[in-house]
């Protein structure tokens, strides 16, 4: 199985924070994945499955290994039913579906996630999220057995799913889309991309929104009103374009990002009484 020792974390996360991880494994199929998990369990090796690393802050002190399912990238489109491997990139899937005249993934063209990472997080935008189109998911459960879970078993909520609460691995996802007009769908994808480029600092490495929006508030607006746009800790900076983004303007470390997160939380709490909750995940 492909494996990289002493891997550079910058290559596997969209924040591109400095640091190395002991090893990253790239299983080719579910049999290899099962063997790997079983071996890690026997040897008590800490492991974490990652997608595109677009929601992660990985500590350079993390003493486990990573598993990346980029080879789980099969795609099968049969009418309006789409079966896709969890390592497939979501924007690429949105485009493929658009070419096939399938509507439902227009929201997803701007989310730099894998299908597995999107299901874990119930990723969404513009009032849509991936749970709107899920039929079923093939899963490696915590006993290392393959099971099928249907939409109603997946406990979807706002940026939440069963995967956040159980050590399940998403292998393959079945989506049910609607038939639509290819040109209209492609036009919508383009519009979404353009509006994102205007509003978000896509020219810098980041991991998207740092904080969840508290009920009835915009986290970005709360941060902006605290005067923190452009505030820096090392090379981690609150974006001028969108205050709910921390961008890496050079060689930021996870420590820089975590210090900046704490500072934002303290300042916003002091000014408004609201404690911002992070959306990004810290792996240590
Ligand atoms: C520029 C930018 C814009 C973004 N915009 C949005 C947005 O509009 N909406 C939104 O919701 N998010 C957005 N995000 C955040 C991010 O893309 C999502 O949280 C996404 O769901 C993460 O997917 P990933 O594949 O990168 O997962 P990772 O970041 O690699 O992992 C996230 C979590 O998913 C788990 N995971 C990954 N794959 C699997 C699997 N196969 N089985 C089980 N668990 C798995 C990991 O263990 C980890 O806990 C944005 C990020 C960026 C950088």
Image (spheres, rainbow, N blue to C red):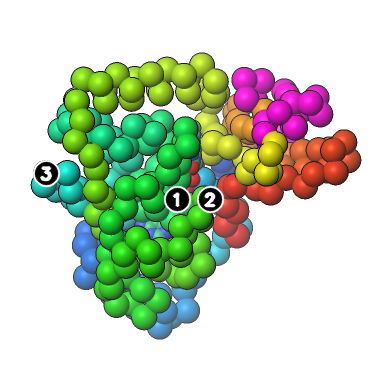
SS for callout 1: loop
Badge 3 marks a residue whose secondary structure is loop
Q: Which mark is residue 79?
A: 3
Going from N to C along the chain, the mark reached first, 2 or 1, is 1
Q: Which residues are magenta?
A: 218-242
Q: Residues within 10 Å of mark 2 (few under 14, many from 20)?
A: few
**Helix, strand or loop at mark 2:** loop
Residue at x 38%, y 19% (from the top left corner): 191
Front of the two marks 1 and 3:
3
- Give the quadrant of the C terminus: bottom right
| Left or right: 65, with 179 as reference point | right
Dot 1, crowdedness within 10 Å: few (<14), some or many (≥20)?
Answer: many
The answer to whether 51 appears left or right of 57 in the picture is left
Residue 40 at x, y = what percent?
A: 40, 75
Q: Which residue is mark 2?
A: 158
- Residue 168's spot in the image, x, y percent? 40, 68
Q: Up-down: is 15 above or below 33?
A: above
Establish whether ligand 1 lies closer than 8 Å to the Cβ of label 3: no
Q: Closest to the observer: 219 or 19?
A: 219
Mark 2 in CB contact with mark 1 (< 8 angstroms): yes
Q: Residue at x 84, y 38 (%)?
A: 272
Q: Is residue 118 visible?
A: yes
Q: If the image is split into quadrants, where does the N terminus sit?
A: bottom left
Q: Residue 264: name its quadrant.
A: top right
């Amino acid at each position: 199985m492909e494996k990289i020792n002493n891997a550079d974390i910058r290559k596997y996360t969209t924040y591109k924070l400095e640091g190395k991880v002991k090893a990253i494994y790239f299983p080719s199929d579910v049999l290899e994945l099962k063997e790997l998990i079983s071996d890690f369990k026997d040897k008590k090796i800490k492991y974490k499955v990652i997608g595109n690393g677009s929601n992660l802050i990985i500590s350079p002190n993390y003493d486990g290994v990573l598993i990346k399912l980029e080879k789980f990238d099969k795609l099968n489109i049969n009418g309006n039913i789409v079966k896709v491997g969890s390592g497939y990139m979501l924007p690429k899937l949105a485009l493929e579906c658009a070419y096939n005249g399938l509507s439902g993934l227009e929201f997803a063209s701007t989310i730099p996630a894998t299908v597995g990472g999107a299901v874990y997080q119930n990723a969404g935008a513009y009032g849509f999220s991936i749970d709107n189109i899920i039929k079923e998911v093939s899963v490696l459960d915590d006993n290392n057995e393959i099971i099928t879970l249907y939409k109603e078993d997946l406990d979807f909520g706002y940026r939440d799913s069963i995967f956040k609460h159980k050590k399940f691995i998403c292998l393959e996802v079945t989506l049910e889309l609607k038939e639509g007009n290819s040109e209209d769908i492609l036009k919508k994808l383009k519009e979404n991309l353009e509006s994102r480029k205007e509003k978000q600092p896509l020219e810098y490495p980041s991991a998207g929104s740092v904080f969840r929006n508290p009920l009835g508030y915009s986290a970005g607006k709360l941060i902006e009103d605290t005067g923190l746009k452009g505030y820096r800790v090392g090379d981690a900076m609150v974006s001028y374009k969108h205050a709910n983004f921390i961008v890496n303007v050079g060689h930021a470390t996870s420590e820089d990002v975590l210090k900046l997160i704490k500072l934002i939380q303290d300042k916003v709490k002091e000014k408004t009484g609201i404690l911002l909750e992070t959306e990004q995940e810290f792996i240590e």
